[in-house]
Image: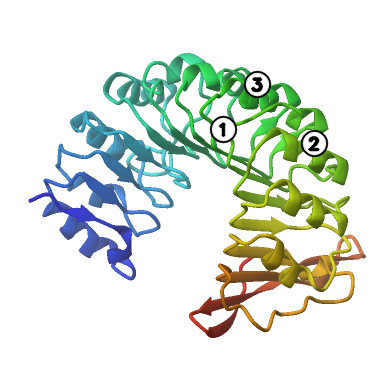
Amino acid sequence: MLAEINSCLYVGIGSAALSQLMSSINATKFLCLRETSLTNGALCKFVGSCLEYLDVSETKVSMVSLAPVIRRNSYLNCLKTAGCPSLLFEHNEVEPMSDSNYRDFVQEIKSICYLEDVEMGWGFCPILIEDLVPSFSRVRKMTIGLGTTLAESVLHSLPDICPFLEFLILRFQVMSDRIVRNLLESALNLQVLCLHCCLGSLTSYSFQAKAPALRILRLEWVTPWITNDDLTILTQNCSLVELSLSGCKLLDSSSQEIICSGWPNLTLLHLEGRGIGKAIISDAIRELPLLRMLALDLCDASEGGYDSPNNLEGTMIRTVRMSRCKSWRSCFEGSSKRVHKDTIVLEWSSRRLRTTIVKERL
């Protein structure tokens, strides 16, 4: 019988116990070890050859233990290795892997796997176009995070390298209007686009292209220049069900009306812009009947806060998140600035309301 091993089973399990568990698994198709205490020693104990899904993100493994697993599992179509800072290190985890060994590892992926879902971070840099062909020709979901920087030529060629691309998340990449326009115009199957803390010189020209397939758009700390006029043009070019806009300093209270009229079927809205009215929660629930999750920043409130709705019967809303900030003074700069403090989370279940406060920015 094929087992499905999920990382939730490993919360609190040490590396020794995890190593013992790996040695007893040999016929699983699904192996998710994300954010566990997985090490090279533990992964080397895994000898299975039926894997289709492998997630070792946010662990301490390196290519020394990962390469043999890939070599044995020719049916692997999902590989997630983001957040593995030791990926390029040899056995002693002090000396970095040589260029030749790195090329050998990339060749392992290139010659064995035809991936459909890939997540990369540390250890995949630099990546050349020829490294991605043909093993990425079937990719539908791609996430590129901190530690891997794709060259402009690679980013611009993604629609050709991955003709079936549907889901793309780019974090800390160097972007340009040329790249974004080409993605929207040429990646005809692209349904999800997330740009998070990307560098470069994006302008409103990036999003003036038609993208009829796009359903989820997240622009997080990459478009501080976006205005209500830009937002209006965007509503004419795509039909969204999820929208996230963070760090958009020029948006104001009118942006809510533009969003609600342009995308009435939104199920998720994350909006950060100046001068948001206190009735936004009730207004959004009323004007977006399918809305299930709303995220705001209390620093954007024009009147110091937001009103909480009283009657939610018959609505779809389940979660409202409100980030809070605090003043922080730098001893080096001698000035204060606003930094994140915590997030208030309101959750409705049936007719009950539960309020929690978490330190993370959600």
Front tag of 3 and 1: 1
* Residue at point 46%, 44% (across, down): 82
In the image, residue 337 above or below residue 243:
below
Q: Which amino acid does label 3 sit on?
A: Asn
Position in image of residue 234 (x %, y %):
75, 38
* The one of 322 and 315 positioned closer to us in this rendering: 315
Q: Which amino acid does label 1 sit on?
A: Ala
* The one of 121 and 323 positioned closer to us in this rendering: 323
Left-right relation of 260 to 290:
right
| Residue 203 found in image quarter | top right
Q: Name the residue under label 2.
A: 233
Which residue appears farthest toward the front when viewing the image? Answer: 314
* Residue at point 84%, 64% (across, down): 276
Q: What residue type is labelled 2?
A: Ile
Q: State how far apart marks 1 and 2 are (Cα).
A: 16 Å
Position in image of residue 97 (x %, y %):
41, 31
Is residue 340 visible in the rendered image? The answer is: no
Which residue appears farthest toward the right when viewing the image? Answer: 334
Is residue 94 visible in the rendered image? The answer is: yes
Position in image of residue 183 (x %, y %):
62, 25
* The one of 131 and 309 positioned closer to us in this rendering: 309
* The one of 125 and 197 positioned closer to us in this rendering: 197
N-term-proximal mark, 1 vs 2: 1
The label number, if any, that marks residue 213 in the structure image: 1
The label number, if any, that marks residue 182 in the structure image: 3
Left-right relation of 267 to 104:
right
